[in-house]
Image (tube, helix red, strand yellow):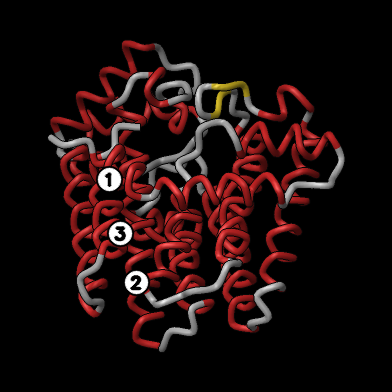
Amino acid sequence: MRNIKQEIIAKAKNDLEGIETALRENLNPHLDLIRETAGHILFSGGKRLRPLLMLLSARLCGYTGNEDKNFSAIFEYLHAASLLHDDIVDGAALRRGKPVAHSIWGSTAAVLVGDFLLARSLSLAVKARNMKVIEVISEITEQMSRGELHQLVRKGDTDLSEAEYMEIIRCKTAVLISAACRVGSLIAGAGEPEEAALAEYGLNMGIAFQMADDLLDYTADSKTLGKEVGADLKEGKLTLPVIYSLKAADPETRVRMTEIIKNKNFSVQSFETLVNILKSHGGIKYTEQKAAEHISGAKAALSIFDKSKTKEILLHIADYALKRKM
C-alpha cells in the first residue's frame, strides 16, 4: 500500500512550511511563558490537518491573496487550546509521546495559555474583515465547549448511546475541521454551493478522523499512539467500538466489560480481554465501517469541483484519515 501520508506531505510541502512560519510569527512578540507552553503543544509533531485543509479549500475556490497562512493559524491555535485544556480535565500524562504541558508549567499556566490561544485565534479571525468568518469561529468554539461538557457529564456511563457519541464527536472534533474548510471558501469569496460542499466534506472528514482515532486506542501500541494505551477508557471516555460491543454482548459478557470499564486501574490482561471482546462482538469492524461511510460522504461532497491537483490532495487526505496508523 502506498504511503498516503508521505504523498500528502510531498505535494503540500510549501503550504506546510508556510503554516509553520505563520504559527511561530503569530505567537510573537509575547511572553516567554506563552511561547514555551504554546510551543510545547504546537510544535510537538501535530499533523497540521486543520490549517492545511483551510489553505486547500481556499485554493480550490480560487483564492489568490497572501493572508491565507495567517488565517489558517486560527484552526491550529483553537485545536491546541482545546488540547491544553483537555489534558488537564482528563488528567493525561502524555500527549504525542511527550509529557503534557501542565506537568511541566503547571495547570494554571496551561489553562491561561490555552485561553490566550483562543483569544489569538479570534483576533486573527477579525482580520479577515468578514462577519461570516467571525460567526463561524464563534459558533464552533461554543459547540466544542458543548461537546466537552456533554462528554464530561456522561463520563464512564456504559449506557452512552451511539447517537450521543456521534453528537459528542461532531462537536468536539468535526465542527472544527468543517469550519476550517468552510472558512477557506469564505476568504476566497466562493458561493453558497461551494461553501456547503466544503463544510460537508470537512464534517464527514472530522467524524471519520475521530472514529479512526478512537480505534487506535484499541489497535495501536503506546509508542505509535503517543499516549498510554487504554487512556481513553481510563479517562471514562466510551467510544464507538465499546458502545457497539456493549449493545451486542450477552448479559454475562456485558457484566465483564462493565467491570473492566469501571476499574480505572485495569490490568494489561484485562485490557487485552476487552479488546478481544470488541473484536469478537463486532465493535472494531463496525467502527471501521462507519468511518468508511463518512469518508465516502466527504469525497462525494467534492464532486461539484472540477478535477485539479488541489482536489486530488483533499481526496488523499480523506484516504489518510481512514487508513492512518497514528
Q: What element carries label 3?
A: helix
Q: In this view, does 315 lie above or below 40?
A: below
Image quarter in which the C terminus is found: top left
* Kind of residue sitting beneath label 3: Leu
Q: What element carries label 1?
A: helix
Q: How many marks?
A: 3
Residue 7 as seen in the image, left or right of residue 106: left
Tell which tag, 1 or 2, sits nearer the viewer.
1
Q: How far apart are marks 3 and 1 (CA)?
A: 10 Å
Q: SS class of the residue under badge 2? A: helix
Q: Which amino acid does the dot numbered 1 rest on?
A: Tyr
Q: Disc 1 or 2, which lies upstream in sequence?
A: 2
Q: What residue is shown with label 3?
A: 314
> Could you tell me if the residues under marks 3 and 2 are in contact, i.e. CB atoms within 8 Å?
no
From mark 1 to mark 2, how far is it between C-alphas?
18 Å
Residue lying at 15% horizontally and 39% vertically, measured from the top left:
282
The residue closer to the viewer here, 62 or 199, is 62
Tell me, for residue 200, which label it has, or none: 2
Mark 2: amino acid: Glu
Front label number (3 vs 1):
3
The residue indicated by pointer 1 is 320
Q: Which residue is drawn at 84% across and 45% down?
A: 30
Q: Where is residue 297 in the image (x, y as percent from the top left)?
A: 22, 66
Residue 263's spot in the image, x, y percent? 46, 22
Mark nearer the viewer, 3 or 2: 3
Nearest to N terminus: mark 3 or mark 2: 2
Image quarter (top left, top right, bottom left or bottom right) of the N terminus: top left
